[in-house]
Amino acid sequence: MHIPDGFLDPKVATGLFGSAVVVLAYSAARVRAAATAVAPAMVLATAGKKAANFALGARRVLTDEGERTIYKMGMVAALVFAAQMFNFPIGSGTSGHLIGGVFAAVILGPFAGSIVIAAVLVVQSFFFADGGLLALGCNMFNMGFFPAFVAYPLIYRIIARGQPGSLRVGVATIAASVVGLQLGAFGVVLQTLVSGISELPFHTFVLMMLPIHLAIGAVEGLATVAVVSFIARARPEALPTSPLPGTATGIRPILAGLAIAAMVIGGAASWFASTHPDGLEWSIARVTGAESVEAPESGVHQRLAGLQEQTAFLPDYGFKQAEPGIATTIPAGPEPDPWPSINAGTSVSGIVGGVLTLILATLAGMALRTRTTSVVPHNL
Amino acid sequence: MGATDWIEIGRMDDLARLDTPMHRLDARAKIIVTLAFIGVVMSFPPHALSALTPFLFFPLVLIYGARIPMGPIVKKILLAMPFALAVGIFNPFLDRRPVLAIGPVTITGGWMSFTSILVRFLLTAGAALALVACTGMVRLASALGQLGVPRVFVVQLLFLHRYLFVVAQEGRNVLRSVTLRSSGTRSLNLGVYGSLTGNLLLRSMDRATRVYRAMMARGFDGEIRLVHPHQVRWIDGAFIAGWLAFFALGRTWNLAGGLGHWLTGVIP
C-alpha cells in the first residue's frame, strides 16, 4: 500500500503533500497543547525538564502526563514497526499482523496517532525505500488520515461503548480497521489513476485493491483487538481510560475530523481545478469509459481514447513536437495520426545516447570515488 | 520485514558517520535538492526513458561521492520493488501501440512506460536512500526542524529511530522464547499473538522509561549535539544551484537523446 514516487504525477503528490503537512501541523499543535502547561517563570528556572525547552519552546513545559504521552508515542511507533515480526496464521498458508493506523488512534487518540503513523512512514521511506519521499503526503493520507480521522471518530468512537475487551469494542475496532483500510486502498487507486502513469483501468484496479484489503482489514482488526484487550487486562493504565487530553469527548473529535476532511478535500479539489480543469473530469470519463468497453486489449477506439486521455491530461509535458520519434517521446497529435512515425535511425540514436549517458554517469561517479578516497584521509 | 532489517538501519547509521565532502554538506541543502530531484523525475511523461538517464548522475554522485557501497542500496531497492512491478506490469498488456523500432523488433508503448516506471522508481528510491546514507537520521531530523517541521514530529522521528533497536531486541527475546517453548510448531493463535505483541509494547515501554530516566539523571536536556556544527558554507549554496540548474537542463532538453543524435549524425 506504500506508493513509490514513480507512480505519481508531481501535482498530485505535492498537492497531497501540502495537505498532509497542514494536518500534521494541526495534529502537532493539538498534541503540544495537550501535553504541556504554561510554566510559571520560577518553574522554568528550576524544573529538571529541560527537554521541554527543546521539544516545545521555552514558555511551555511538559506535564508528567505529557511526558508519558511523548515517549509512549515513540514506543507505539516502534511497536507498529516491530509488530510485523510476529504473524498469526489465518489458514491456507497466509498469515496476518498488526498494521497500525487504528491501533495508534485507539492507544493515543487521533492526533498523536496520526503523528505516529506519519513518523513510521517517514522512517520506512528513508531506510527501506518503502514508499516515496514526495509520495509521503499520499501515503500519510491513505494510511494515517483515513484510519485516525475518519474511521476512528466516525466508526470506532460511535460504536465502542464499554470496557476494552468487550464484544462491542471488538466489533468497533474491526469495523474501523476495515473501513480505514478500504478508504486507504481506494485512495491509492484514485491517486495513481489521476496521475496517469499506470495504464490499469479503474474497475480492474479497484477490483485488485479493495477485496484484498477487505481481508487485510479484517485481519488487522482482529490483531488490534487481540493486542488492545491484552493491554487492557495486563496494564489498564496504559490505555486512555478517560478520553485523552488531545481527543476531547463526544461530538468534538467527529466535528474536528469532518472539518479537517472537508478542508483537505476542498483544498485538494480546488487545487486540481485551478491547475488542471479537466483532471477530475478525466478520471470520471475514464471510469465511465472503462465500464462501457469491456475488453481492454482490443479496439482502435480504446487505443485512441487512451492516447487522447494522455495527451489531454498531460498537455504540457515534454518536447513532443520538437523531436518526433525519439525513444522518449510519443508524438502527440490529438487526432488522425495516432502512431508515431517510427524511424529506426532516430530510435537507435535515442538508445545510443541513453546508454552512453549511463556509462558516463557511472564513470563520473567512479572518478569521484577515487578522488574522494584520496582526499578524505587527508581531512581525517 | 525480518529481524535482520534492524541491522540494516544500523548499517545506514554507520555509513552516515563517514566523513566525506558529501557528508559535510548541509543536510538542508541535500534535502532540498533531493526533493527537487524527485519532483523533476516524477514530472516526465509516462513513456520517457532516454531523457531520464542523465538524472542517474545525481544519485550516483551522492553514492560514490559519499563512498557508500552499492550493495546495501541495491538490495533495499530490490526489496521495495514488488509494488512497482505489481502495478506497472499491466502496462505492456494494456498499451500495445508501437512506439519504437530497432530493426525488426518493435517495442510497444506499454513496455516503454513499464520500463520508465522501473527507472523512475530506481532513481527516486536510490536518491532517497543515498540521502539518508550520507546524512544520517539525527542530522536529517534536525534539518527538518530547521526547515519548519513541527518539533513534536521531529522528536517523534528521533524517538522512533532510537526505540526501534530497543523494541527489536525485546522482540528477538520474545521470539526466541516462543520458539523454545513451542517445540517446533511455528503457528501462534490469535490469543498468543495478542499477548505477545501487547507484552512487547509493555516491556519496551518499561525499558524505554528506564533509559529515559537514566538519560535525564545524566543531564540530558533533550538536545542531541552534533560533532559537526551546522554552518552554511558557500559550497552548500553551490550544491543547490548547480543541481537545480542541471535538473532544469535535463528536464528541458533530452540530453541523452541529443548526445545520441550528435554521435549517430541523425540530427533532425
Image (spheres, helix red, strand yellow):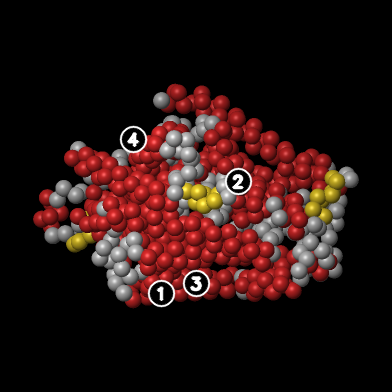
- Residue under mark 4: which chain is it in? B
According to the picture, the residue beneath numbered tag 4 turns out to be: B227
- Of B106 and A80, nearer the camera is A80
Determine if marks 3 and 4 fall on one subunit: no
Q: Does residue A174 appear in the picture of this structure?
A: yes
Alpha carbons under labels 3 and 4: distance apart: 44 Å
Q: x, y (%) of residue B129?
A: 51, 42
Mark 3, secondary structure of its residue: helix
Q: Circle 2 is placed at which residue position?
A: B81
For the residues labelled 1 and 4, say whether their Cβ atoms are less than 8 Å apart.
no
Query: Mark 1 sits on what residue?
Result: A259
Residue A129 spot, x, y in % from top left: 53, 46
Q: Which residue is mark 3?
A: A265
- Residue in the picture at 57% in, 47% down: A93
Instruction: Identify which amino acid the numbered label 4 is placed on.
Output: Val
User: Residue A28, relative to residue B178: is it above or below?
Assistant: below
Category of crowding for the residue at label 1, using alpha-carbon neighbours closer than 10 angstroms: few (below 14), some (14–19), many (at least 20): few
State yes or no: discs 3 and 4 in contact (Cβ < 8 Å). no
Identified by mark 1, the residue type is: Ala
Residue depicted at x 72% and y 38%: A356
Determine if marks 1 and 2 fall on one subunit: no
Relative depth, front residue between B118 and B101: B118
Residue type (three-letter) at the residue carrying disc 2: Met
Q: Is residue A353 left or right of residue B42?
A: right
User: Alpha-carbon distance for marks 1 and 2?
Assistant: 37 Å
Cα gap from disc 4 to disc 2, whole angstroms:
36 Å
Q: In front: mark 3 or mark 2?
A: 2
- Secondary structure of residue under mark 2: loop
In this rendering, do the residues under marks 1 and 3 share a single chain? yes
Q: Residue at x 45, y 66 (%)?
A: A175
- How many numbered discs, if any? 4
